[in-house]
Image (tube, rainbow, N blue to C red):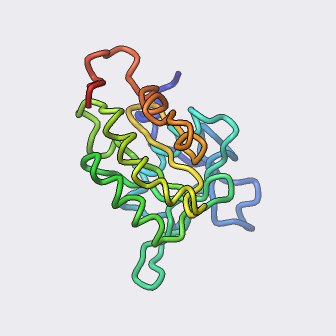
Amino acid sequence: MENVISHVCHMTAPNADEEETDYAQDLNYRERLLIHRNADKREERQNVIAARIILESFPETKIKIREHHLEEGVKNPEYEINGMLADRKGIESERGIKWGFISAIKQGCQIVVIDLNDRMWSKPLRPNTIARMIKWRHRDFELGTIKKCYVLYHERAVEVNAVHLETGEVPDIIKKLKPQNTASEIDATA
């Protein structure tokens, strides 16, 4: 698998209908990843990296990185994933998952992208703690406010939805994020 993180330079190609759209295609993922010309420049690199990780893990997915602007004091969602609004939350600890959900809901998102790469890259993966924090948001899934949550760690993404919460599969799903070469990166007891 090509390293999705190291190839962010020269990331877009012109769209065939450039005059009709404000989006450009990603060089690697073409029409599966469209980037708005007015996307948030401060977070564009992290947003592209996270989008590529999701696309690598979920080949049928399509993502748009949206135009950046404030709506009534609330930052607009960064992504549209398969037609649903989503926002990337670069959390500093597992406890940030709660605030990531709250913030995404305020933004009108149906999908939350929990990006452990942003500030937790060098920390060990603690699947049970992450699963517990997501399970505490079960009401968001039950009410249909949140349809799914992607969790990203290193170059992998997993998806959690209401069915996974009901069946108790969340810890096993999060364990799939384990880096292939480093068994010591996972603290299975946490």
Please state which of residues 77 and 140 is positioned toward the viewer in this rendering: 140
Query: Which quarter of the image is occupied by the C terminus?
Result: top left
Q: Position of residue 41 (x, y in %)?
A: 41, 62
Q: Quadrant of residue 79?
A: bottom right
Q: Position of residue 96 (x, y in %)?
A: 30, 54
**Residue drawn 23% across the image and 34% down it:** 123
**Is 74 on the left-hand or right-hand side of 150?**
left
Q: Position of residue 4 (x, y in %)?
A: 47, 33
**Residue drawn 55% across the image and 58% down it:** 146
Q: Position of residue 186 (x, y in %)?
A: 30, 24
Please state which of residues 59 and 105 is positioned toward the viewer in this rendering: 105
**Residue drawn 31% across the image and 16% down it:** 182
Q: Quadrant of residue 40?
A: bottom left
Residue 16 drawn above or below residue 143: above
Residue 63 drawn above or below residue 18: above
**Is 40 on the left-hand or right-hand side of 146?**
left
**Residue drawn 52% across the image and 43% down it:** 165
Q: How many numbered marks appear?
A: 0
Please state which of residues 33 and 93 is positioned toward the viewer in this rendering: 93
Residue 80 drawn above or below residue 59: below
Q: Quadrant of residue 80?
A: bottom right
> Which residue appears farthest toward the bottom when viewing the image?
72
